[in-house]
Amino acid sequence: MKVCVYTLGCKVNTYESEYILLKLIEHGYQIGSIDDVCDIYIINTCTVTNTADIKSRKIINRVKRLNPNACIVALGCFVEDHQDDDLGIDIYIGNKDKSKIIELLDLYFTNKEVIKRVGLNKDKFEDMFITDFKNRCRAFVKIQDGCENFCSYCIIPYVRGKCRSKDLNTVIKEVTVLVNKGFKEIVLTGIHTGNYGVDLNTNFANLLNELVKIKGLRRLRISSIEVTELTTEVLDVLKRSNIIVDHLHIPLQAGSDKILKLMNRKYDLKYFEDKLREIRKIRPNISITTDIIVGFPSESEEDFLETIENSKKFAFTKIHVFPYSDRLGTSASKMTGHIDGNIKKARARELLNVSHELEKEYASKFIGETLEVLFEETKDGISIGHTSNYLKVKVKGNIPFNTFRNVNIKSYLLDSLIGEVED
Protein backbone atom coordinates (compact mmCIF):
# COMPACT_ATOMS: atom_id res chain seq x y z
CA MET A 1 0.00 0.00 0.00
CA LYS A 2 1.03 3.58 -0.67
CA VAL A 3 1.21 5.93 2.31
CA CYS A 4 1.85 9.66 2.72
CA VAL A 5 3.25 11.15 5.94
CA TYR A 6 2.61 14.90 6.15
CA THR A 7 4.05 17.05 8.93
CA LEU A 8 2.92 20.35 10.41
CA GLY A 9 4.56 22.27 13.25
CA CYS A 10 7.80 21.91 15.16
CA LYS A 11 11.05 19.96 14.91
CA VAL A 12 9.72 17.44 17.43
CA ASN A 13 6.95 16.63 14.94
CA THR A 14 9.55 16.35 12.17
CA TYR A 15 11.50 13.83 14.24
CA GLU A 16 8.39 11.81 15.09
CA SER A 17 7.27 11.78 11.46
CA GLU A 18 10.70 10.57 10.37
CA TYR A 19 10.47 7.72 12.85
CA ILE A 20 7.03 6.80 11.49
CA LEU A 21 8.30 7.00 7.90
CA LEU A 22 11.22 4.68 8.63
CA LYS A 23 8.89 2.19 10.32
CA LEU A 24 6.57 2.21 7.31
CA ILE A 25 9.48 1.59 4.91
CA GLU A 26 10.74 -1.21 7.17
CA HIS A 27 7.33 -2.90 6.91
CA GLY A 28 7.12 -2.69 3.15
CA TYR A 29 4.89 0.32 2.60
CA GLN A 30 5.37 2.41 -0.53
CA ILE A 31 5.91 6.09 0.29
CA GLY A 32 3.94 8.74 -1.58
CA SER A 33 3.45 12.49 -1.32
CA ILE A 34 0.56 14.71 -0.29
CA ASP A 35 -0.30 15.16 -3.99
CA ASP A 36 -0.53 11.41 -4.66
CA VAL A 37 -3.60 9.24 -4.44
CA CYS A 38 -2.54 7.10 -1.49
CA ASP A 39 -4.14 4.26 0.44
CA ILE A 40 -3.16 5.84 3.76
CA TYR A 41 -2.55 9.46 4.76
CA ILE A 42 -0.86 10.17 8.10
CA ILE A 43 -1.09 13.82 9.20
CA ASN A 44 1.14 14.87 12.10
CA THR A 45 -0.73 17.93 13.35
CA CYS A 46 0.00 21.14 15.28
CA THR A 47 -2.16 23.30 17.54
CA VAL A 48 0.23 25.97 18.82
CA THR A 49 -1.83 28.76 17.18
CA ASN A 50 -5.24 29.19 15.59
CA THR A 51 -3.47 29.22 12.22
CA ALA A 52 -1.97 25.82 13.01
CA ASP A 53 -5.45 24.48 13.81
CA ILE A 54 -6.77 25.78 10.50
CA LYS A 55 -3.88 24.20 8.59
CA SER A 56 -4.39 20.86 10.35
CA ARG A 57 -8.11 20.76 9.48
CA LYS A 58 -7.40 21.91 5.93
CA ILE A 59 -4.91 19.11 5.24
CA ILE A 60 -7.19 16.48 6.77
CA ASN A 61 -10.09 17.64 4.58
CA ARG A 62 -7.85 17.85 1.52
CA VAL A 63 -6.74 14.22 1.69
CA LYS A 64 -10.30 13.06 2.41
CA ARG A 65 -11.34 14.67 -0.88
CA LEU A 66 -8.28 13.33 -2.72
CA ASN A 67 -9.18 9.73 -1.88
CA PRO A 68 -12.47 9.21 0.01
CA ASN A 69 -11.63 5.52 0.39
CA ALA A 70 -8.24 6.07 2.02
CA CYS A 71 -7.42 5.35 5.64
CA ILE A 72 -6.90 8.78 7.24
CA VAL A 73 -4.72 9.00 10.35
CA ALA A 74 -4.39 12.23 12.32
CA LEU A 75 -2.00 12.39 15.23
CA GLY A 76 -0.33 14.92 17.49
CA CYS A 77 -1.22 18.13 19.29
CA PHE A 78 -4.30 19.17 17.28
CA VAL A 79 -5.87 15.76 17.86
CA GLU A 80 -5.03 15.91 21.58
CA ASP A 81 -6.61 19.35 21.91
CA HIS A 82 -9.70 18.40 19.88
CA GLN A 83 -10.10 14.82 21.05
CA ASP A 84 -13.87 15.15 21.37
CA ASP A 85 -14.27 16.44 17.80
CA ASP A 86 -15.48 14.15 15.04
CA LEU A 87 -12.93 14.78 12.29
CA GLY A 88 -14.42 12.08 10.06
CA ILE A 89 -11.20 10.08 10.02
CA ASP A 90 -10.21 6.51 10.77
CA ILE A 91 -7.41 6.63 13.34
CA TYR A 92 -7.02 9.31 16.02
CA ILE A 93 -3.68 9.36 17.87
CA GLY A 94 -2.82 12.07 20.38
CA ASN A 95 0.64 12.47 21.89
CA LYS A 96 1.12 8.89 22.91
CA ASP A 97 1.28 5.68 20.87
CA LYS A 98 2.78 7.38 17.80
CA SER A 99 5.48 4.72 17.94
CA LYS A 100 2.75 2.05 17.57
CA ILE A 101 1.66 3.22 14.11
CA ILE A 102 2.26 -0.15 12.41
CA GLU A 103 0.29 -2.01 15.10
CA LEU A 104 -2.59 0.47 14.83
CA LEU A 105 -2.71 0.30 11.03
CA ASP A 106 -2.79 -3.50 11.21
CA LEU A 107 -5.62 -3.31 13.75
CA TYR A 108 -7.62 -0.92 11.59
CA PHE A 109 -7.31 -2.98 8.41
CA THR A 110 -8.28 -6.11 10.35
CA ASN A 111 -11.41 -4.68 12.00
CA LYS A 112 -12.18 -1.63 9.82
CA GLU A 113 -13.34 0.24 12.92
CA VAL A 114 -12.41 3.76 14.03
CA ILE A 115 -9.51 3.79 16.47
CA LYS A 116 -9.02 6.50 19.12
CA ARG A 117 -5.79 6.64 21.12
CA VAL A 118 -5.86 10.04 22.82
CA GLY A 119 -4.91 11.09 26.34
CA LEU A 120 -1.44 11.93 27.55
CA ASN A 121 1.41 9.61 28.39
CA LYS A 122 1.95 11.26 31.75
CA ASP A 123 4.94 9.46 33.21
CA LYS A 124 7.10 7.81 30.57
CA PHE A 125 9.02 9.10 27.58
CA GLU A 126 7.77 7.34 24.46
CA ASP A 127 10.95 5.88 23.05
CA MET A 128 11.73 6.42 19.39
CA PHE A 129 15.15 5.66 17.96
CA ILE A 130 16.13 6.90 14.52
CA THR A 131 18.96 5.39 12.51
CA ASP A 132 18.61 7.61 9.44
CA PHE A 133 17.11 10.92 8.34
CA LYS A 134 16.15 10.78 4.68
CA ASN A 135 17.38 13.48 2.27
CA ARG A 136 18.91 15.67 4.99
CA CYS A 137 22.45 16.46 6.05
CA ARG A 138 21.45 17.44 9.58
CA ALA A 139 19.59 14.94 11.73
CA PHE A 140 17.19 15.77 14.56
CA VAL A 141 17.25 13.80 17.79
CA LYS A 142 14.30 14.14 20.15
CA ILE A 143 15.63 14.05 23.69
CA GLN A 144 12.65 15.32 25.69
CA ASP A 145 8.87 15.76 25.65
CA GLY A 146 6.39 17.79 27.67
CA CYS A 147 6.44 21.17 29.40
CA GLU A 148 5.41 22.38 32.84
CA ASN A 149 6.12 26.09 32.45
CA PHE A 150 2.45 26.98 31.85
CA CYS A 151 3.09 30.29 30.13
CA SER A 152 -0.28 32.02 30.18
CA TYR A 153 -0.68 32.04 26.36
CA CYS A 154 0.43 28.47 25.66
CA ILE A 155 -1.69 25.37 25.09
CA ILE A 156 1.29 23.02 24.74
CA PRO A 157 1.59 21.88 28.41
CA TYR A 158 -2.02 20.70 28.17
CA VAL A 159 -1.48 18.67 25.00
CA ARG A 160 2.09 17.43 25.60
CA GLY A 161 1.94 16.78 29.35
CA LYS A 162 4.63 16.74 32.00
CA CYS A 163 8.35 16.70 31.25
CA ARG A 164 9.79 13.32 30.24
CA SER A 165 13.34 12.67 29.04
CA LYS A 166 14.99 10.04 26.87
CA ASP A 167 17.56 7.90 28.67
CA LEU A 168 20.98 9.55 28.48
CA ASN A 169 22.76 6.45 27.17
CA THR A 170 20.05 6.01 24.53
CA VAL A 171 20.59 9.57 23.31
CA ILE A 172 24.35 8.99 23.12
CA LYS A 173 23.80 5.75 21.20
CA GLU A 174 21.34 7.36 18.78
CA VAL A 175 23.65 10.30 18.02
CA THR A 176 26.59 7.90 17.59
CA VAL A 177 24.61 5.77 15.11
CA LEU A 178 23.64 8.85 13.09
CA VAL A 179 27.19 10.20 13.05
CA ASN A 180 28.50 6.82 11.91
CA LYS A 181 25.84 6.93 9.19
CA GLY A 182 27.47 10.10 7.87
CA PHE A 183 25.58 12.92 9.57
CA LYS A 184 27.97 15.68 10.55
CA GLU A 185 25.45 17.92 12.30
CA ILE A 186 22.94 16.86 14.94
CA VAL A 187 20.08 19.03 16.22
CA LEU A 188 18.80 18.30 19.73
CA THR A 189 15.10 18.93 19.99
CA GLY A 190 12.31 18.67 22.53
CA ILE A 191 9.26 20.55 23.75
CA HIS A 192 11.30 21.98 26.64
CA THR A 193 14.77 20.94 25.51
CA GLY A 194 16.87 22.65 28.17
CA ASN A 195 14.85 20.93 30.92
CA TYR A 196 16.26 17.59 29.80
CA GLY A 197 16.97 15.18 32.63
CA VAL A 198 14.70 16.70 35.27
CA ASP A 199 13.08 13.27 35.66
CA LEU A 200 16.28 11.23 35.29
CA ASN A 201 18.65 12.53 37.95
CA THR A 202 20.79 14.21 35.30
CA ASN A 203 20.67 17.49 33.36
CA PHE A 204 21.18 19.09 29.96
CA ALA A 205 24.80 20.08 30.66
CA ASN A 206 25.72 16.47 31.45
CA LEU A 207 24.17 15.36 28.17
CA LEU A 208 26.06 18.02 26.19
CA ASN A 209 29.32 17.03 27.89
CA GLU A 210 28.87 13.44 26.72
CA LEU A 211 27.72 14.23 23.19
CA VAL A 212 30.61 16.54 22.29
CA LYS A 213 32.96 13.58 22.91
CA ILE A 214 31.45 11.52 20.08
CA LYS A 215 34.03 10.89 17.40
CA GLY A 216 33.09 12.29 14.00
CA LEU A 217 30.47 14.75 15.26
CA ARG A 218 31.29 18.13 13.74
CA ARG A 219 28.35 20.24 14.87
CA LEU A 220 25.85 19.99 17.71
CA ARG A 221 22.92 22.38 17.52
CA ILE A 222 20.21 23.09 20.13
CA SER A 223 16.84 23.73 18.52
CA SER A 224 15.68 26.14 21.25
CA ILE A 225 16.49 26.78 24.89
CA GLU A 226 14.98 28.95 27.62
CA VAL A 227 17.25 31.66 28.97
CA THR A 228 16.82 30.29 32.51
CA GLU A 229 18.30 26.97 31.40
CA LEU A 230 21.54 28.46 30.13
CA THR A 231 23.17 27.54 33.40
CA THR A 232 26.80 28.02 34.36
CA GLU A 233 27.37 24.34 33.51
CA VAL A 234 25.79 24.67 30.05
CA LEU A 235 27.78 27.81 29.30
CA ASP A 236 30.93 26.00 30.41
CA VAL A 237 30.36 23.40 27.67
CA LEU A 238 29.79 26.26 25.21
CA LYS A 239 33.09 27.74 26.30
CA ARG A 240 35.11 24.51 26.11
CA SER A 241 33.75 22.84 22.98
CA ASN A 242 33.57 24.22 19.47
CA ILE A 243 31.32 21.27 18.59
CA ILE A 244 28.46 23.32 20.00
CA VAL A 245 27.57 25.66 17.14
CA ASP A 246 27.83 29.45 17.21
CA HIS A 247 24.05 29.87 17.37
CA LEU A 248 21.44 29.79 20.13
CA HIS A 249 17.70 30.27 19.76
CA ILE A 250 16.46 31.84 23.01
CA PRO A 251 12.77 32.85 23.13
CA LEU A 252 12.21 36.31 24.63
CA GLN A 253 8.45 36.44 23.87
CA ALA A 254 8.07 40.09 24.95
CA GLY A 255 10.34 43.10 25.38
CA SER A 256 8.32 44.55 28.25
CA ASP A 257 8.53 43.45 31.89
CA LYS A 258 4.83 44.14 32.30
CA ILE A 259 3.93 41.74 29.48
CA LEU A 260 6.50 39.12 30.55
CA LYS A 261 4.83 39.01 33.97
CA LEU A 262 1.38 38.64 32.41
CA MET A 263 2.77 35.86 30.23
CA ASN A 264 4.05 34.04 33.33
CA ARG A 265 7.57 33.94 31.96
CA LYS A 266 10.29 33.03 34.47
CA TYR A 267 12.64 36.00 33.99
CA ASP A 268 12.68 39.75 33.51
CA LEU A 269 14.50 41.89 30.95
CA LYS A 270 17.52 42.50 33.18
CA TYR A 271 18.01 38.76 33.68
CA PHE A 272 17.74 38.19 29.93
CA GLU A 273 20.16 41.00 29.09
CA ASP A 274 22.71 39.87 31.68
CA LYS A 275 22.60 36.32 30.30
CA LEU A 276 23.15 37.58 26.74
CA ARG A 277 26.15 39.55 27.96
CA GLU A 278 27.52 36.43 29.63
CA ILE A 279 27.07 34.36 26.46
CA ARG A 280 28.70 36.96 24.23
CA LYS A 281 31.66 37.17 26.57
CA ILE A 282 32.25 33.49 25.77
CA ARG A 283 31.32 33.66 22.06
CA PRO A 284 31.59 37.28 20.80
CA ASN A 285 30.21 36.55 17.32
CA ILE A 286 27.47 34.13 18.31
CA SER A 287 24.12 34.37 16.52
CA ILE A 288 21.20 34.71 18.92
CA THR A 289 17.73 34.36 17.43
CA THR A 290 14.45 34.64 19.30
CA ASP A 291 10.65 34.38 19.33
CA ILE A 292 8.44 37.36 20.16
CA ILE A 293 4.65 37.50 20.47
CA VAL A 294 3.00 40.82 19.61
CA GLY A 295 -0.48 41.95 20.58
CA PHE A 296 -0.66 40.04 23.85
CA PRO A 297 -3.70 41.12 25.95
CA SER A 298 -3.11 44.57 27.53
CA GLU A 299 -0.03 45.26 25.37
CA SER A 300 -0.11 49.04 24.94
CA GLU A 301 1.62 50.97 22.19
CA GLU A 302 4.27 51.91 24.78
CA ASP A 303 4.81 48.24 25.63
CA PHE A 304 5.22 47.42 21.95
CA LEU A 305 7.68 50.28 21.40
CA GLU A 306 9.67 48.97 24.37
CA THR A 307 9.80 45.59 22.63
CA ILE A 308 11.13 47.26 19.47
CA GLU A 309 13.75 49.13 21.48
CA ASN A 310 14.91 46.05 23.39
CA SER A 311 15.01 43.90 20.25
CA LYS A 312 17.55 46.32 18.84
CA LYS A 313 19.38 46.64 22.15
CA PHE A 314 19.72 42.87 22.50
CA ALA A 315 21.00 42.69 18.89
CA PHE A 316 19.12 39.58 17.89
CA THR A 317 20.19 38.03 14.62
CA LYS A 318 16.63 37.17 13.66
CA ILE A 319 13.20 37.45 15.28
CA HIS A 320 10.43 34.93 14.68
CA VAL A 321 7.34 37.11 15.11
CA PHE A 322 3.96 35.73 16.16
CA PRO A 323 0.74 37.75 16.54
CA TYR A 324 -0.89 36.63 19.79
CA SER A 325 -3.22 33.69 19.17
CA ASP A 326 -6.03 33.13 21.66
CA ARG A 327 -6.01 29.51 22.86
CA LEU A 328 -9.12 28.38 24.70
CA GLY A 329 -8.23 26.89 28.07
CA THR A 330 -5.20 29.08 28.74
CA SER A 331 -5.22 31.80 31.39
CA ALA A 332 -4.44 34.49 28.77
CA SER A 333 -7.68 33.63 27.01
CA LYS A 334 -9.58 34.83 30.09
CA MET A 335 -7.69 38.12 30.37
CA THR A 336 -9.19 41.49 29.53
CA GLY A 337 -7.66 43.93 27.07
CA HIS A 338 -7.49 41.72 23.99
CA ILE A 339 -5.93 43.56 21.03
CA ASP A 340 -7.66 44.20 17.71
CA GLY A 341 -6.50 41.87 14.94
CA ASN A 342 -5.45 44.70 12.60
CA ILE A 343 -3.29 46.21 15.33
CA LYS A 344 -1.63 42.83 15.91
CA LYS A 345 -0.90 42.48 12.19
CA ALA A 346 0.55 46.00 11.99
CA ARG A 347 2.80 45.37 14.99
CA ALA A 348 3.94 42.06 13.52
CA ARG A 349 4.92 43.77 10.25
CA GLU A 350 6.83 46.49 12.09
CA LEU A 351 8.77 44.01 14.21
CA LEU A 352 9.51 41.86 11.15
CA ASN A 353 11.06 44.92 9.49
CA VAL A 354 13.29 45.33 12.55
CA SER A 355 14.21 41.65 12.27
CA HIS A 356 15.23 42.07 8.62
CA GLU A 357 17.44 45.04 9.56
CA LEU A 358 19.11 43.13 12.40
CA GLU A 359 19.62 40.06 10.21
CA LYS A 360 21.31 42.10 7.49
CA GLU A 361 23.45 43.98 10.01
CA TYR A 362 24.70 40.77 11.62
CA ALA A 363 25.33 38.88 8.37
CA SER A 364 27.15 41.82 6.77
CA LYS A 365 29.78 41.69 9.51
CA PHE A 366 31.15 38.55 7.87
CA ILE A 367 31.76 40.04 4.42
CA GLY A 368 35.44 39.55 3.64
CA GLU A 369 35.81 36.68 6.10
CA THR A 370 36.19 32.96 5.42
CA LEU A 371 33.48 30.76 6.94
CA GLU A 372 33.07 26.99 7.07
CA VAL A 373 29.84 25.98 5.33
CA LEU A 374 28.00 22.67 5.39
CA PHE A 375 26.39 22.34 1.96
CA GLU A 376 22.90 20.90 1.80
CA GLU A 377 21.54 21.32 -1.73
CA THR A 378 22.20 22.56 -5.26
CA LYS A 379 19.63 24.43 -7.35
CA ASP A 380 20.24 25.71 -10.89
CA GLY A 381 24.01 25.60 -10.49
CA ILE A 382 23.97 27.34 -7.09
CA SER A 383 25.01 25.40 -3.99
CA ILE A 384 23.40 26.35 -0.69
CA GLY A 385 24.51 25.63 2.87
CA HIS A 386 24.74 27.03 6.37
CA THR A 387 27.50 28.20 8.66
CA SER A 388 27.89 27.25 12.30
CA ASN A 389 26.01 30.44 13.21
CA TYR A 390 23.22 29.41 10.82
CA LEU A 391 23.80 31.98 8.11
CA LYS A 392 22.65 30.83 4.68
CA VAL A 393 25.48 30.87 2.13
CA LYS A 394 25.25 30.53 -1.65
CA VAL A 395 28.09 29.80 -4.08
CA LYS A 396 28.28 29.02 -7.78
CA GLY A 397 28.94 25.41 -8.69
CA ASN A 398 27.86 21.96 -7.63
CA ILE A 399 29.23 21.27 -4.17
CA PRO A 400 28.61 17.67 -3.06
CA PHE A 401 25.75 17.18 -0.60
CA ASN A 402 26.73 16.97 3.09
CA THR A 403 30.25 18.30 2.67
CA PHE A 404 32.10 21.15 4.35
CA ARG A 405 33.87 23.87 2.37
CA ASN A 406 35.64 27.06 3.37
CA VAL A 407 33.91 30.00 1.68
CA ASN A 408 35.16 33.55 1.32
CA ILE A 409 32.16 35.84 1.81
CA LYS A 410 31.79 38.56 -0.85
CA SER A 411 28.36 40.13 -0.30
CA TYR A 412 24.90 39.91 1.26
CA LEU A 413 21.82 39.63 -0.94
CA LEU A 414 18.25 39.32 0.35
CA ASP A 415 18.55 36.64 3.07
CA SER A 416 21.85 35.05 2.01
CA LEU A 417 25.58 35.57 2.05
CA ILE A 418 27.22 35.19 -1.37
CA GLY A 419 30.69 33.72 -1.50
CA GLU A 420 33.40 31.80 -3.33
CA VAL A 421 34.78 28.42 -2.32
CA GLU A 422 38.42 28.63 -1.28
CA ASP A 423 39.51 25.00 -1.33
Image (spheres, grey):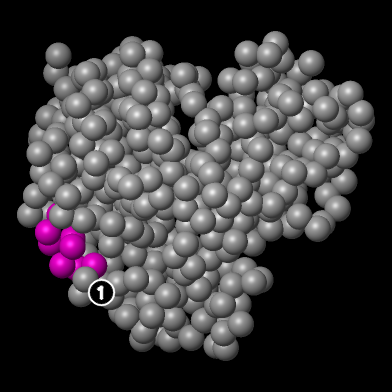
> From where the camera sits, is residue 224 visible?
no
**Residue 112, x across and y down, in percent:** 92, 30
Q: Residue at x 61, y 38 (%)?
A: 7
Would you identify the image quadrant in which residue 96 lies?
top right
Residue found 24% across the figure and 45% down from its top: 205
| Relative height, residue 325 to residue 60 (above, below) | below
Q: Where 373 falls versus 250 (above or below)?
A: above
Q: Residue at x 44, y 61 (%)?
A: 321
Q: Amino acid at mark 1?
A: Leu
Q: Quadrant of the C terminus?
A: top left
Q: Is residue 159 left or right of residue 36?
A: left
Residue pointed to by mark 1: 269
User: Which residue occupies the foreground of this view, 181 or 371?
Assistant: 181
Residue depicted at 21% across the width and 71% down the height? 271
Residue 342 position within the rendered picture, expressed as x and y whole percent measured from the top left: 57, 75
Residue 276 is a magenta residue: yes
**Magenta range:** 272-279
